[in-house]
């Protein structure tokens, strides 16, 4: 048969492929000459099962062939030709391809799921793991693994439980399937969460059945577990925070009649549980205090109508009758189409705060009532005092006036009948009664200080002091007194009282310097501890500082009447005026060197 | 000053003595009628009660009126005097030991023509007040 040679001689490889449509099994590479099974026979070669792909007009989708060739030789060994047998293996090829693809998918799925596969031969207790599981459990690549070794990897806390579950699965009456989540400890020291599912195969019939093989998969779910734990933890913290803060959260689904989903704490706040709360809005409203129901309904309706949120306090009544004050905040949530879909809100138990508020209000009211009562008492006392003072001014004055006037009448009308002693006595009676009159008058003035209240205004101390000084000097022009009055002293005070105060102070200075041929009286101010301190200084008679604490008491006198006139009311009056202004007063003095009276008026502070 | 009488309304006998003496001393020769309380003053002025039949056409030249009086006080007397048509023209000098602003204001408000404080020292009264009284 001469055709082989001519074929070999005339066709280039590509042309051959094109001409015959023969390719390698990759379906695109033309078959190389050396692989052409028939031509190889001419070289005396034999080939078995050479895969080929043939695409021809008769089979445009192509067919897979398996070629087996043998040379044909004569008795002397000369090659006479060749035989080639082609099998159409297209069907087998396609099955293989499908199987491979399926395997690829399984592998990919297992890779994606980090899934390992294991097989246990129950009789020998030998465990076969795939590479992934071997690596996951930290076994060596060729390390033999038996069932005990496998169980040894399970976390000590989970081991007993898993063993029990395995026993159940191996029991033909109950088992057959094993599905558990547990931890495994790998030698590197890490703990991994896995989920393992396996099927147990049995041999035998009925009661004789016994497990022979276990085939299973094992997946690393550490990350999922961690996420789950974190979620649980965060849920726990949220719950705890809500519990501590007595804050609950809720969602109302507007697509299903406002069906309510409550957090655990809302149930606590309402004193309800999942059994006796059906999530219906009406059931919620049943618990709202009747007086507040309308307001809560209105707030919910308005928020759904378009107002985006509400914020209100209201009361509820728990099933056991306890009244609870709530603070509610809610916001409207819209779906993708911009329609209202949910109302979500938080609710806080503010009972304690409310009770405290009520208590405060009650206390305030009580306090106010007490202040009112005290004020009324005080007013009553003031009235009584006023009546007393009024009575004093009339009734005390009248007899004194009688003594004074009648002794004057005696002196004038019976002058000739009196000797010098008698006349002296009458003079003294009149002087004494006059003093008594002044005393009464001054006491009345002192009492009036507390009764009249006129409010503060800027008072020109410099101007007042100057006017008083001029007045004194006018009445006793013969006296040689140098006045030093600091200019521009303005105090925020009650002007009438300041006038009385300055009159008293300057009167004292004027009086106690009267025995000195030359005198100096000074009125000024300085700043101390951010307050303005005023002073009135003289170089007069002075007093012994040992008695300084008595200085401002009423009727306290440091000099006899024959030395200096007076009744001891002046400085008491001054002190009362200073105190009325929230100020303080004190004195420094030295006998025959003079006295300085210092005082502050609370306003203005610097 | 006319020769009509002066009505002194004063309950304190010492004050009465001293005022009468001061008036005499100040050469005021008018008859001085003394009544001791507010009611008596009104009866005198209206010719009723104890003064039933007194000619009310003859009213005093001046009333010296203490404020603090038994029965009817001076303020009440002032009110009644002011309310009586034939008394409105009679000058009233309020004479009292009160130096309270409210008494002074009230007195003037009720038609008092003047107000004199009774001082402790009667010498001051003699000098200051008598000349004042003479003006009425």
Image (tube, coloured by chain):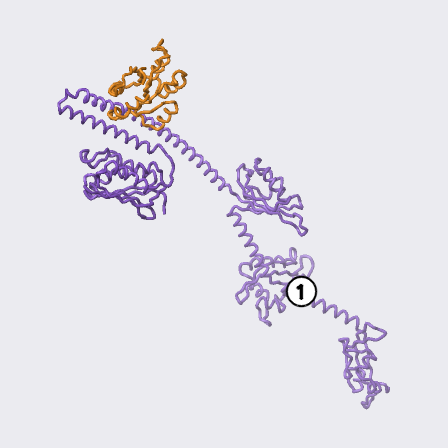
Q: Position of residue A321 (x, y in %)?
A: 54, 36
Foreground residue among A130 and A511: A511
Is B11 placed above or below A437 here?
above
User: Which residue position is annotated with label 1?
Assistant: A109
At x 24% / y 40%, what residue is drawn? A509
Is A246 placed above or below A507 here?
below
Q: Position of residue A91 (x, y in %)?
A: 79, 70
Confirm whether residue A122 shows in the render. Answer: no
Task: Check the picture and name the quadrant holding the N terminus of chain B.
Answer: top left
Q: Position of residue A159 (x, y in %)?
A: 56, 60
Q: Residue furthest top?
A: B53
Of helix, strand and loop, which one carries label 1? Answer: helix
Q: Colour of chain A?
A: purple
Asked where in the image residue A541 lies, by quadrant, the reply is: top left
At x 53% / y 58%, what residue is drawn? A157
Asked where in the image residue A131 lies, by quadrant, the reply is: bottom right
Please give the chain letter of the residue carrying mark 1: A
Specify whether B76 is left or right of A87: left
* Chain given the colour orange: B
Confirm whether residue A289 shows in the render. Answer: yes
* Mark 1 residue crowding within 10 angstroms, few (<14) / some (14–19) / many (20+): few
Q: Position of residue A433 (x, y in %)?
A: 22, 26
């Amino acid at each position: 048969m001469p055709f082989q040679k001519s074929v070999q001689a005339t066709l280039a490889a590509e042309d051959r492929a094109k001409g015959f449509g023969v390719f390698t099994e990759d379906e695109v590479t033309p078959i190389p000459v050396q692989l052409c099974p028939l031509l190889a026979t001419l070289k005396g070669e034999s080939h078995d099962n050479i895969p080929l792909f043939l695409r021809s007009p008769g089979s445009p989708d192509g067919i897979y062939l398996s070629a087996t060739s043998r040379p044909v030789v004569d008795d002397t060994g000369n090659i006479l030709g060749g035989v080639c047998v082609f099998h159409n293996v297209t069907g087998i090829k396609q099955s293989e391809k499908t199987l491979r693809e399926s395997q690829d998918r399984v592998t990919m799925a297992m890779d994606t799921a980090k899934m390992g596969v294991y097989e246990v031969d129950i009789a020998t207790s030998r465990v076969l793991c795939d590479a992934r599981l071997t690596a996951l459990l930290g076994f060596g690549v060729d390390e033999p693994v038996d069932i005990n070794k496998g169980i040894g990897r399970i976390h000590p806390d989970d081991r007993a439980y898993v063993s029990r579950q395995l026993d159940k699965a191996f029991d033909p009456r109950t088992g057959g399937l094993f599905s558990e989540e547990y931890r495994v400890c790998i030698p590197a020291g890490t703990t991994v969460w896995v989920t393992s599912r396996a099927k147990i195969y049995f041999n035998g019939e009925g009661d004789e059945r016994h497990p022979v093989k276990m085939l299973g998969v094992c997946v690393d779910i550490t990350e999922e577990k961690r996420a789950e734990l974190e979620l649980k933890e965060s849920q726990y913290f949220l719950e705890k925070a809500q519990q501590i803060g007595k804050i609950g959260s809720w969602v109302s689904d507007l697509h299903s009649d406002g069906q309510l989903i409550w957090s655990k704490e809302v149930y606590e706040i309402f004193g309800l549980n999942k059994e006796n709360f059906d999530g219906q809005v009406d059931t919620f409203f049943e618990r709202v205090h009747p007086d507040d129901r309308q307001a809560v309904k209105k707030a919910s309706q308005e928020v759904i109508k378009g107002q985006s949120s509400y914020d209100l306090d209201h009361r509820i009544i728990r099933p056991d009758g306890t009244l609870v004050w709530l603070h509610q905040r809610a916001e409207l949530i819209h779906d993708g189409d911009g329609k209202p879909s949910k109302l979500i809100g938080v609710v806080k138990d503010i009972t304690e705060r409310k009770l405290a508020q009520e208590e405060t209000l009650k206390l305030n009211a009580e306090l106010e009532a007490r202040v009112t009562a005290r004020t009324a008492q005080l007013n009553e006392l003031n009235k009584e005092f006023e009546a007393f003072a009024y009575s004093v001014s009339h009734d005390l004055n009248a007899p004194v006036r009688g003594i004074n006037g009648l002794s004057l009448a005696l002196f004038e009308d019976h002058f000739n009948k009196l000797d010098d002693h008698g006349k002296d006595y009458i003079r003294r009676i009149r002087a004494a009664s006059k003093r008594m009159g002044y005393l009464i008058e001054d006491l009345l003035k002192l009492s009036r200080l507390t009764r009249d209240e006129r409010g503060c205004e800027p008072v020109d101390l410099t101007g007042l002091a100057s006017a008083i000084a001029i007045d004194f000097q006018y009445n006793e022009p013969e006296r040689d007194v140098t006045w030093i009055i600091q200019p521009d002293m303005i105090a925020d005070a009650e002007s009438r009282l300041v006038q009385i105060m300055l009159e008293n102070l300057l009167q004292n200075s004027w009086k106690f310097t009267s025995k000195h041929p030359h005198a100096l009286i000074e009125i000024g101010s300085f700043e101390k501890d951010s307050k303005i301190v005023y002073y009135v200084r003289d170089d007069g008679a002075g007093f012994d500082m040992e008695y300084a604490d008595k200085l401002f008491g009423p009727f306290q006198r440091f000099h006899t009447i024959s030395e200096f006139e007076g009744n001891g009311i002046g400085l008491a009056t001054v002190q009362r005026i200073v105190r009325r202004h929230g100020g303080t007063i004190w004195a420094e003095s030295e006998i025959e060197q003079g006295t300085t009276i210092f005082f502050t008026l609370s306003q203005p502070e610097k | 000053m006319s020769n009509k009488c002066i009505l002194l309304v004063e309950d304190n006998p010492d004050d009465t003595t001293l005022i009468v003496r001061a008036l005499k001393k100040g050469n005021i020769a008018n008859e001085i009628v003394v009544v001791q309380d507010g009611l008596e003053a009104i009866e005198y002025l209206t010719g009723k009660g104890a003064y039933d039949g007194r000619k009310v056409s003859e009213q005093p030249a001046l009333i010296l009126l203490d404020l603090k009086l038994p029965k009817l006080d001076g303020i009440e007397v002032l009110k009644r005097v002011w309310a009586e048509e034939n008394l409105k023209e009679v000058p009233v000098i309020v004479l009292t030991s009160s130096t309270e602003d409210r008494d002074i204001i009230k007195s003037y408000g009720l038609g008092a023509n003047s107000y004199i404080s009774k001082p402790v020292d009667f010498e001051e009264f003699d000098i200051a007040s008598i000349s004042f009284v003479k003006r009425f």
